[in-house]
C-alpha cells in the first residue's frame, strides 16, 4: 500500500515541507500556479538556487533602509524533503483563482493517481497552501473521492492572517460534508419514489467511518427505505417485517400494510385495489406510463374479482359453471358456451363485470353504462408494448385511462360504501424522520 500526498502550493513553503517530512509519503502531487516567482509557485517545488528563501523586505522606521525579514537561503521543496524525481509530479494552473480550472486540474491529477497507484492506498489531500480557490477545489475533490483523507496544517495563531510556525499536520473529519452531500442525493431519489437508488446510496454511505449516532440514524433511514422498496414491489409481508420495527413512528403505514394483507378484523377488502392505484401513480410520477396503465388495468380487474368473491363466492379463475348454476341457472346457461372443457369460468376484466351485471350487481350496471368508454381506454392498454402491442404510452394516455378507470372504481366504491383512499408511500419526509 502506497502513501500518497496531494498538496496545494502557495507562497509559504514551510508548512508544505513540514507536511512532507511528517507524513513521509511514497509519492507527492503538487498543485501549483504557473509562472516564475513571485506569481507562480512551480519554482518552489523544484526550482534551482534558493527559491524557498524568504525574500520579504521591510523598511527601517529609523534609518529608512530596506532589510530582509527572513533567511534568504532556502532550497526547493524537493531538495529539503529529499524527494527524488520519480516520487513527485507537478500539476499547474494558469489562473489560481479560477475554480473551474483548479477543479479540472485536480480531477486530471486524480485520474493519474488512480491509474498510477491501483488497489488500496492511503491518500491524503492537504489544502494548507495555495490560493483559497485552489484549497476549495482540493477539499471538494477530496470529499467526492471517498478513499481520500482530508488534512490541514494547524498551529498557534498570533493574528488572523496565518499560522506562522509550529504547525501540525492534522487529518480532518470530512464525514459531515459527505453525509450532507449523500443525504441530498437520497432526498432527490426519494422525491421520485426511487427507493432502490436511495437504498444503494445509503448502503455505500454506511461503509464510511461515521460516528455512532450518525451511523445509527442512517441505518434506521436505510431500513425504512428498504421496507418501502419491498412494498413498492408488492412484497407486502416482507415490507411489514421491516416497517413494523418502527412502531408508532410509521403506525399509519403499518395499519395500511396489515389491511392490504387482510390482517385486520374490520379491514377493507378493497385495500389491494387502493394500493395498486397508488402504485400506478408512483410509476406515472417516474414517467413509466406503460407500467402505470398496466397497474390501472389490474386494479380495475381486481375490484371486480373481489366483488365476485365477496358477494357471490365466485372466483373468476377457479370457479366452475356448476358453482355459477347454484347461484343463477339462467346466467349459468348463458355462460356455458364460453367455458372450457374443465368448465372453469376464466373471466377477464370485461367478462367479470358483465357477469356482475348479469347477476344484478350494482357495479355491473355502472360498468355497462360506461362500457364503450372503458373498452376504448382498455384498447390503449392492449396496444401498449407491455401488453399485446408495440406502442409506448405517454402521459396523456395515462391521464385519460386514469380518469376513466379510476372514475369507474370511485363510482362503484361510493355506491357500495367502500373506501379507496389510501395514504401514498412517503418520499423526502423519510429523511426528516431521522
Image (spheres, helix red, strand yellow):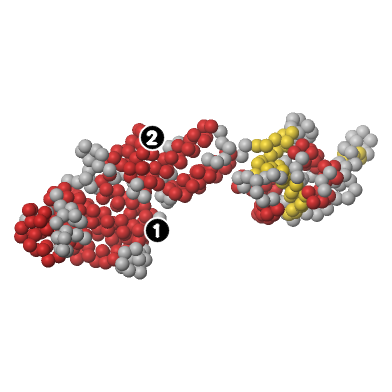
Q: Which mark is residue 275?
A: none
On the question of residue 295 being in view, the answer is: yes
Quadrant housing the N terminus? top right
- In this figure, which residue is indicated by the disc labeled 1? 287
Above or below 94: residue 125: above
Q: Where does residue 293 sit, x and y in percent of width and height?
A: 31, 59
* Label 2 secondary element: helix
Quadrant hosting residue 105? bottom right
Above or below 16: residue 33: below
**Side of 23 relative to 389 (left or right):** right
- In this figure, which residue is indicated by the disc labeled 2? 246
Q: Where does residue 121 sit, x and y in percent of width and height?
A: 67, 45
What residue lies at 88% left-to-right and 37% top-to-bottom? 69
* Label 1 secondary element: loop
Judged by depth in the image, the label closer to the viewer, 1 or 2, is 2
Instruction: Looking at this view, name the residue that lies furthest to the front.
Output: 342
Nearest to the observer: residue 238 or residue 170: 238
**Side of 189 relative to 85 (left or right):** left
Amino acid at each position: 500500500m502506497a502513501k500518497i500526498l496531494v498538496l496545494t502550493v502557495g507562497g509559504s513553503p514551510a508548512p508544505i515541507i513540514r507536511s512532507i517530512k511528517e507524513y513521509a509519503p511514497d509519492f507527492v502531487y503538487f498543485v501549483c500556479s504557473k509562472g516564475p516567482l513571485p506569481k507562480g509557485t512551480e519554482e518552489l517545488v523544484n526550482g534551482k538556487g534558493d527559491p524557498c528563501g524568504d525574500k520579504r523586505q521591510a523598511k527601517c522606521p529609523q534609518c529608512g533602509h530596506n532589510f530582509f525579514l527572513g533567511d534568504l537561503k532556502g532550497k526547493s521543496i524537493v531538495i529539503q524533503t529529499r524527494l527524488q524525481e520519480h516520487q513527485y509530479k507537478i500539476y499547474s494552473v494558469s489562473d489560481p483563482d479560477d475554480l473551474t480550472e483548479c477543479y479540472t486540474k485536480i480531477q486530471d491529477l486524480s485520474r493519474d493517481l488512480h491509474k498510477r497507484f491501483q488497489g488500496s492506498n492511503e491518500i491524503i489531500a492537504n489544502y494548507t497552501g495555495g490560493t483559497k480557490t485552489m484549497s476549495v477545489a482540493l477539499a471538494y475533490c477530496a470529499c467526492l473521492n471517498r478513499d481520500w483523507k482530508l488534512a490541514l496544517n494547524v498551529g498557534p495563531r498570533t493574528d488572523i492572517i496565518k499560522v506562522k510556525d509550529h504547525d501540525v499536520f492534522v487529518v480532518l473529519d470530512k464525514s459531515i460534508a459527505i453525509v450532507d452531500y449523500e443525504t441530498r442525493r437520497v432526498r432527490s431519489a426519494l422525491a421520485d419514489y426511487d427507493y432502490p437508488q436511495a437504498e444503494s446510496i445509503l448502503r455505500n454511505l454506511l461503509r464510511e467511518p461515521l460516528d455512532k449516532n450518525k451511523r445509527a440514524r442512517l441505518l434506521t433511514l436505510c431500513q425504512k427505505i428498504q421496507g418501502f422498496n419491498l412494498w413498492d414491489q408488492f412484497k407486502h409481508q416482507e415490507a411489514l417485517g421491516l416497517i413494523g420495527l418502527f412502531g408508532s413512528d410509521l403506525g399509519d403505514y403499518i395499519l395500511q400494510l396489515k389491511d392490504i394483507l387482510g390482517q385486520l378484523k374490520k379491514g377493507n377488502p378493497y385495500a389491494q385495489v387502493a394500493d395498486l392505484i397508488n402504485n400506478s401513480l408512483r410509476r406515472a410520477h417516474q414517467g413509466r406510463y406503460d407500467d402505470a396503465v398496466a397497474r390501472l388495468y389490474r386494479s380495475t380487474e381486481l375490484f371486480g374479482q373481489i366483488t365476485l368473491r365477496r358477494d357471490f363466492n365466485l372466483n373468476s379463475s377457479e370457479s366452475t359453471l356448476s358453482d355459477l348454476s347454484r347461484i343463477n341457472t339462467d346466467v349459468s346457461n348463458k355462460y356455458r358456451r364460453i367455458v372450457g372443457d374443465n368448465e372453469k369460468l376464466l373471466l377477464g376484466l370485461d367478462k367479470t363485470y358483465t357477469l356482475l351485471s348479469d347477476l344484478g350487481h350494482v357495479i355491473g350496471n355502472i360498468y355497462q353504462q360506461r362500457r364503450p368508454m372503458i373498452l376504448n381506454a382498455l384498447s390503449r392498454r392492449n396496444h401498449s408494448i407491455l401488453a399485446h402491442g408495440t406502442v409506448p404510452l405517454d402521459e396523456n394516455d395515462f391521464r385519460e385511462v386514469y380518469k376513466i378507470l379510476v372514475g369507474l372504481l370511485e363510482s362503484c366504491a361510493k355506491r357500495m360504501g367502500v373506501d379507496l383512499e389510501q395514504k401514498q408511500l412517503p418520499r423526502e419526509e423519510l429523511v426528516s424522520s431521522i
